[in-house]
Image (cartoon, grey):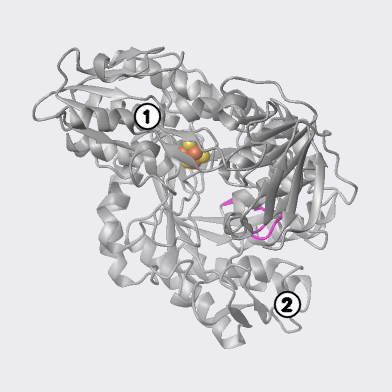
Amino acid sequence: MKESPVRYPSLSSKFPLGPFTLKNRLIMAPIVTGMETTVNISVIRDFYEKRAAGGAAMVTVSEAIIDKGGRRFAYEHAFTEDDVALHKPVVKAIHKHDSLAVLQLEHLGIDADVQVAISTVSAQSRVTGRHGWPARNTELKRLVDLYGRVALLAIEAMYDGVEIDGSGSGLIADFLSPVTNRRLDEWGRTQLARFKLALDVVRSVRKSIGENRLIGFRFNLCEVHAKGADWAEIKRLIQMLRMAGVDYLACDFGNRYVPMPMKGYAVAPGAFFDDYMALSEIAEMPVVFGKELASMEKMEAIAAMNDAAIFEVAEPLIADPAFIVKSLSGQEELVNACTRCMIGCIKKNNHPNEPISCLVNPYLFESQEVLEKPAARPKEIAVVGSGIAGLFFSLTAARRGHKIHLFEKSEKIGGMLRMMGRIPGRELFLPWLERIEKELESLGVVIRTNTPATKELLTERHFDEYVIAAGATPRVPDIDGIDSSNVLTYEELLADQMAVGDRVAVLGTNTIGLAVARYLACGQREVAFSDAQAWRNAWGIGSVKENKGGVLGVIPEIAPPVRQVYLMERNEEETKQLLYIRTKLCDWKWLRMKGVQTFRGVNFELIDNYSIHVSRGEHHRDPVTIPITHVVVCWERSPNRSIYYALLTAGKKVHSIGTCAEDSMNRNLVSISSEARLLALKL
Ligand code: SF4
């Protein structure tokens, strides 16, 4: 990498943290990868080492489960002596790059994935659906000692310290919160009693690891709940944590149950900066700013005026392990930028065995040797289609030395991704596509846009192999009047930019349907996704300093919709399944706030130029006629396989990937990019 002047002097400067010094002020946030098992320790080592080598001044490794009863997922086990030897190579790999390594200590409360979870009081988990019980006095005392023991094991594994997680829906967070801790004993009777578990744990850990190791404490700075802690309580807690031996603070906002998005495209960058600033004014110790960071420029400005601020990075480091070193050296154009899509990088409770993934980085857990291994015999390969499958196949194959010819029927590469880039919250897909195009060109990929791939064109010269990634075409449902001039597909709406009127029905509540409804209701830009104050006003979030629990307590302000949208679905069950996904649930709430009306489980009887007629059930009861100007169809899609069959019958060696593959149903963008990468590594 070429030498550049220091672009961000404050962020690049060294930073004293407890008995240590950070090489810069950007650290890696804890990320639950789903790979935290003993068999995957080499994968985990590579994962963290790449981020340390990529500039992270400190890496917080996630996560040491204190006791089996507090595990997040069934595959996790309690951290014991056996884990010390397994973690040593991870820590060594991080230290090799002059980065600190800290282990996060975790014990979940009511949401733990065990038969009988413990919490403050008897309650039912909304995550597991199981009933949890109040932890007994002896149990809590045992846990306090266990925290100390596990922290000591972390030090034996050569970690520089530990981060105690008292945030989210962890057991410590449950005990700290006035909302969830309604105990009447010494662990909850008063404010100080609610602090007791957190403070006892910190003291136990400090006693175990001594003075020359780090203790970080992560807590819910703002619960986004009207009965949450007020500012006086937060100040008191911070003071007591400091006295108990905490070296730095990290924060979370809300808990698992907050009704609004807390991450990703639907949160304005820097939405929580004012709260972090308020905390750093009273903390008298370093404060880790995180949660939807804004631009590097904004972070540099904060670092320049706030001596207590360091910054933790999560998703940008998933997308590009070298995000920090590239950004600090002024080579941001080389960053494989996170699109804030949240499509793959949230560990899903309903798929506990699936590791996280990333839309723009399908190489997340790939070892460097595999990635850099050149092809045994470089080939000439024709790729049809430049959606996510075609792009990642071309990129990976070209890096391995194959000569790629990429055929795209549209004017620009990107396929579905480019279409989605027009939707508010998905705008970052577009600059990412520009960057990928440049990289493909630099790898010598021949890109032929405006070129529909025909059998004649593809066979007029020799190719060793063909990869068909031609995507899918929206399926038009069989409804009376579907051929009316006011009916269009999502492709015609997004790609061809066809104009629509002020009352639009969207048929289909799948991922595309929700996104199209957002596009129609918000217009091309949603200010609340980009402006921090507008975002807070929309969700009714106040200042943590002035509003108890961070709740404004007034009617939220939200920009009015640009048109009336009706979201309609035949199959109620499908919609229910979708709403189990938290990001989709938040999308749904946002649409309702934008006045979108939903009709689930309806029969579509007729579409005419002015209305859509629907009814319910097999007896077609409750008929309703809804006046509309347009209908947008977001139905299932049919794979485009004709060119695949044509080449196959011509005796060519041909593969199909992505949504045009035979079994393409239920594939999401992340699984498609991963499939493309695997094929490219095989050829
Ligand atoms: S999946 Fe999306 S949000 Fe997550 S790291 Fe990748 S690009 Fe960013």
Q: Which residues are magenta?
A: 248-259
Residue 606 position within the rendered picture, expressed as x and y whole percent measured from the top left: 71, 43
Point out the residue furthest to the right here.
554
Q: Label 2 amino acid? A: Gly
**Residue 470: mark:** 1
Report crowding for label 2: few under 14, some 14 to 19, many 20 or more residues within 10 A (C-alpha): many
Q: CA distance from mark 1 to mark 2?
A: 60 Å
Residue at 74 percent across and 38 percent down: it is: 274
- The part of the image, by quadrant, that contains residue 435 is top left
Residue 23 position within the rendered picture, expressed as x and y whole percent measured from the top left: 43, 34
Placement of 486 over or under 542, stated as above or below: above
Label 1's element? loop
Residue 144 position within the rendered picture, expressed as x and y whole percent measured from the top left: 53, 75
Label 2's element? loop
Which residue is disc 2 drawn over? 188
Placement of 17 over or under 355, stated as above or below: above
Specify which label sits upstream in the sequence, 1 or 2: 2
Residue at 50 percent across and 50 percent down: it is: 346
Answer whether residue 157 is magenta in the image: no
Residue 317 visible in this rendered orientation of the protein: yes
Point out the residue furthest to the left here.
377
Q: How many marks?
A: 2
Q: Label 1 amino acid? A: Ala
Residue 609 position within the rendered picture, expressed as x and y whole percent measured from the top left: 76, 30
From the viewer's perspective, tell me whether residue 311 is left or right of residue 71.
right
Residue 52 visible in this rendered orientation of the protein: no
Residue at 63 percent across and 20 percent down: it is: 497
- The part of the image, by quadrant, that contains residue 408 is top left
